[in-house]
Image (cartoon, coloured by chain):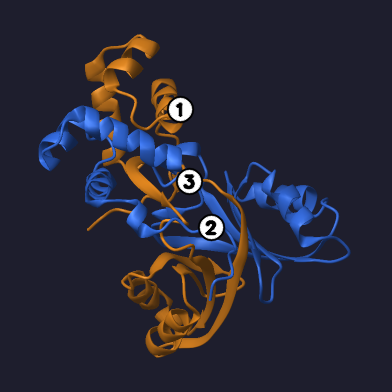
Chain colours: A orange, B blue
Amino acid sequence: MNGPRLDELDRRIIEKLGRDARVSNRQIAAELKVTEGTIRSRIKRLQAEHLIQFTVVTDFRVAGSPNLVMMGIQADPSRVGALAKQLADIPEINCVIVLLGRYSLLAMGLFTSIEQLNALIFGRIRVLEGVRDVETSISVHNVKYEVGVARITAKE
Amino acid sequence: MQIRSGRTLSATTLDALDNGIIEMLRVNGRATNQEIAERLSVTAATVSSRLRRLEEMGASRVVAVTDFAAHGYNVLIAVGVKVAGREVQDVARDLARLPEVFSANIMNGAQDIEMLVALHDFSEINLFLLDHVAGIAGVDTLSPGIAADIVKFEFNVVPL
C-alpha cells in the first residue's frame, strides 16, 4: 500500500485545485507564497505519481440520464485476474474492482437502455471463461458521489 | 429504460465548439484558455465564456481528481445495505453524511443501498461498519466486500 508521499505544500496545492481545477499556477503561487516554478514542478510530480489528474466531467443529463448498474460477478478463482482485464477492456464498463467477500468481481457501468445492458451481460460477460454468475442491480437514485476522489490508474 | 425522472439536457444544447473544448480539457484539464483557443481557432475570451456557460448550465466542469492514496485512503470497501422499518431514502441520506462514504446509491435488486467507502486502514473497518453504520436506525443487514484491486475507475459522467 502507498505510504504518505505528500508534504504540507502538496496538500495545500491539492486543496486549492480541488476547489478550482482551473486556477492558474501564478495564483496558487501567490496565495501560498512560493514561486510559480515550484507550483509547476509540484503539480507535474503529483501527476506523474498518479496522485492527481485534471479532466472534464459531464453531467448525467448531457449523457441522456443513464442509470448506474452494478454487476456482482462470481467467478472461478483461477480466472479472476484475467477476467478483471477482459472486463476493463469493455468500453461500456467504467469500473472494475477485484473484490474479497461478496463477489469475485464488481463491475459498474452507465446505461440508458435495458436492451443495451442485457446485450452486454449475455453477449459479452456471461460468455467469458470462468464467469459463473452475474448479479445485476440498478441504481434508481444517486444520493452521493464525490467527483474529486477516485483511483487514478496508469495508462499503458 | 428511463428510470431517472430528472429532465434531460439534449445533446444539441452543446455545439461543436463546446464539444471541442470539452475534448481538449478531458485530455488535459490544465490547458490554458489560450492553448485551447489557438487549437480551435477562436479567441481566449470565447473559450472563457463557453466554459463559464457550461459550468453555469451544470453541463460539465473541469475537476481535479485526486487518488485515494493522496488522502491516505488505502482500503476501499463496497457495502450493500438492507433496510427494515424505515424509509430507504432516509437511511441513505444518513449514510451519505458519513465522510468515509464517497458514493451512495439507492438500488433495486437484492440490496436497498450500495455504497463505496474509503478508509485509511483495515483497523477502521470495524469501527466504521459496527459503530457508525450499524448505529443508523433502519440499517438491517450489511454485506461488505473488500477491494483487493481496483483495475479500472473511469467515470466521466457524474451527477453535477
Measured in 3D between alpha carbons, the distance from the residue under mark 3 to the one under mark 2, in whole angstroms, is: 21 Å
Give the side of residue B141 with respect to residue A52, left or right.
right
Mark 3 or mark 1: which comes first in sequence?
A: 1
Picture quadrant of residue B64: top left
- Rate crowding at label 2 as few (under 14), some (14 to 19) or many (20 or more) other CA atoms within 10 Å: few
Pinpoint residue B47: horizontal percent, then vertical percent. 24, 34
The residue type indicated by label 3 comes to Val
Name the residue tied to disc 1: A15
Measured in 3D between alpha carbons, the distance from the residue under mark 3 to the one under mark 1, in whole angstroms, is: 14 Å
The residue type indicated by label 2 comes to Arg
Q: Closest to the observer: B142 or B93?
A: B93
Measured in 3D between alpha carbons, the distance from the residue under mark 2 to the one under mark 1, in whole angstroms, is: 33 Å
- Rate crowding at label 1 as few (under 14), some (14 to 19) or many (20 or more) other CA atoms within 10 Å: some
Q: From what the image shows, is residue B147 above or below residue A37?
A: below
- Residue occupying image coordinates x 40% and y 51%: A58
Instruction: Pinpoint the chain carrying mark 1.
Output: A
Say the numbered circle drawn on residue A147. Answer: 3
Pinpoint residue B108: horizontal percent, then vertical percent. 66, 73
Give the side of residue B42 with respect to residue A84, left or right.
left
SS assignment at label 2: loop
Say the numbered circle drawn on residue B7. Answer: 2
